[in-house]
Image (cartoon, coloured by chain):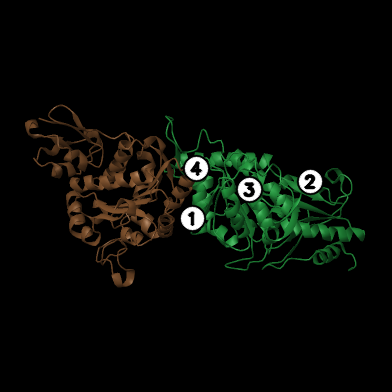
Amino acid sequence: MGDIHIAEERCKGCGLCIDACPRGLISFAEDLNEKGYTYVEFTGDLEQCTGCTLCATACPDQGIEVWNKRGKQTFENTTGLTERMSHYCPGCTHGIIHRITAECLQELGLLDRTVGVAPVGCSVLAYEYFNVDMFEAAHGRAPAVATGAKRARPECIVFTYQGDGDLCSIGGNEILHAANRGEKITVIFVNNAIYGMTGGQMAPTTLPGQRTSTSPDGRDIEATGHPINMAELLATLSTPAYIARGSSHDPQHVLKTKKMIKKAFEHQASGTCFSFVEVLSTCPTNWGLAPQESGDWVRDHMIPQYPLGVIKQPESVS
Amino acid sequence: MTKVLMKGNEALGEAAVRAGCRHFFGYPITPQTEIPEYLVKRLPQVGGVFVQAESEVASINMVMGAAGMGIRCMTSSSSPGISLMAEGVSYIAACELPCVIINMMRAGPGLGGILPAQSDYFQATRGHGHGDYQVIVLAPSSVQEAVDLMTLAFELAETYRNPVMVCADGMIGQMMEPVEFAGEPDALPPNEMGGDDWALGVREGRKRRIVNSLYLSPDELNEHNLKLKAKYDDIAAKETRHELYGPEGDAEGGGGYDLLLVAFGTMARICKTAIDDVRAEGLRAALFRPITLNPFPFADLRRAMDAIEGDGAVFDVEMSMGQMVYDVKLAAEGTRRIEFHGTAGGVVPSPDEVAQKIREILGAAPA
């Protein structure tokens, strides 16, 4: 028998943990929590819980901690994030990507010398959530700010956390040249194929035919071009780099992506190369899909356009 | 100290190094390119960092990154490049980070031309990006003064945690003059800015810090702007600098001139020659030269205006279509007639041209 603790007050009722539990032990409560969300609760037989941690892995809001049947805590909230509730919409996987990034920094013992750079976009407030020194940069300029920070203090671990509008559109030049110079920084690139914060406009990563508020009839590739595969594009540069793409749409992929992010930070810590991890994520609000359906949409529509895996690594490691 | 003959741009690069700056981020643009070309060789000699950025947009954001880590740093550019930096300077000012920006002004608008101009006065003195912020602006009129002002620029930037612009024109950057540097070339000050209570970096147990300009609460953002305003007021009260040239005796106390010229930078230097020429003819003209364009020395200029004999006029001369003249009018508050002469496009008025204008204003016969 394992044990899980669900922090009712942190729950936004996205239900991703319900889907994640292999034994169907979590369900929505009848009541609303203080914030007005239908929270989840453990309703199954505790004897059946194996403490597998998939529920906590799927939770975007640091809302679940898990113990295994021997009473050992198998999932503990990371100290790499502050306790502040995020502003992200229910089911948005930004929270998950924040968490695995912070977990990697914590596990590598880097939190005390890490400086993050937040972007403009949905994750503009990332500086409130990462429990490290943080910049908030102008739209798209995070790789330039990170360049200056890293060149000033090479002993620090410097990372940027950027969305697709920020990195791929307005900041296209900054990311391209930071990668080409081989800056020893780590870039976490969150791709949800849409502009979230401004309310769902077309991004360079929007899929052909995808409806957004500025492509109401679906993205017309004749007029607006094709989606930009940023990871592959950066991988064409001759400069050594670690470039990978993961996804946050289910717990298994979250765990695989976490390994990529950890590898990226390891490359920076050893001074090996520029590192870049693109993470496919969801935007239930602007896609007009439920959180679970959003995960399916990533699987069925985004991954075919944006294949997962390590796309490039420095030669010495391959 | 020995004098060395140096090109203005190179001398500015050396002056930055002597002031303890070891991090430069920039992008080539005429007529300032000798600054990065000098520093790419000089900085490695002192363990410094030179990064040629992909654009001026990136340069200024790299400066933000390095400044936020508490490391003395700078960039340099010329007019069109400075326009591209507007966004970043607004963020740096909002975040209260110290940095130095050199603007070796060239002629505009648009791509304009590569020859000297002073047509970025508005841009420099009104905080050229968005929002209520100000940049301290220093305007040298010789290579030596440019060198001296670089040291002051870093001091002011760090004292007030604010961007400082050294605003010269292409003439200063391109000409060679004898200069001497304070300090020793191999005994440089540390490049730490003393950001013990604000800079990001290795935490060693301290509370985490955030360099940020986002305030979603109107009240908090209002408070932030009031705090910045109080700082700018403090700077205005303490840091204005100017030169008064040519009056007989103690001009601050009582006259000695019938016409007061106002000019800055290269134009001021030309005006001095013109003043020397007309004074030889018995015409009593003097020059007020603002060294800080922002804060503008309003009170000092007004005192100099009040000391003009009788109902004598003020004569503002610029290598622009008339930008500083608005501040001159503000200083006068309608008490003096303001004459203006300006050229644009890289056309630099000659001393003779200025002298002739002085004669016209004073009703004297042409020389």
Give how far apart the Cα atoms at labels 4 and 1 are.
Answer: 15 Å
Which residue was labeled with disc 3?
B16
Looking at the picture, do discs 4 and 2 lie on one chain? yes
Looking at the picture, do discs 2 and 3 lie on one chain? yes
N-terminal of the pair, mark 1 or mark 2, is 1
Circle 2 sits in a helix, a strand or a loop, which is it?
A: helix
Mark closer to the observer (4, 2)? 4
Give how far apart the Cα atoms at labels 3 and 4 are.
Answer: 19 Å
Circle 1 sits in a helix, a strand or a loop, which is it?
A: helix
Q: Which chain is green?
A: B
N-terminal of the pair, mark 4 or mark 1, is 1
Give how far apart the Cα atoms at labels 2 and 3 are.
Answer: 34 Å
Q: Chain of mark 3?
A: B
Q: Amino acid at mark 4?
A: Gly
Left or right of B311 in this view: B298: left
Q: Which mark is residue B68?
A: 4
N-terminal of the pair, mark 4 or mark 2, is 4
Q: Amino acid at mark 1?
A: Ala
Q: Nearer the viewer, residue B234 or A148?
A: A148
Which residue was labeled with disc 1?
B58
Q: Chain of mark 2?
A: B
Which residue was labeled with disc 2?
B303
Looking at the picture, do discs 3 and 4 lie on one chain? yes
Quarter holding residue A104: top left
Q: Colour of chain A?
A: brown
Give how far apart the Cα atoms at labels 1 and 2 are.
Answer: 43 Å
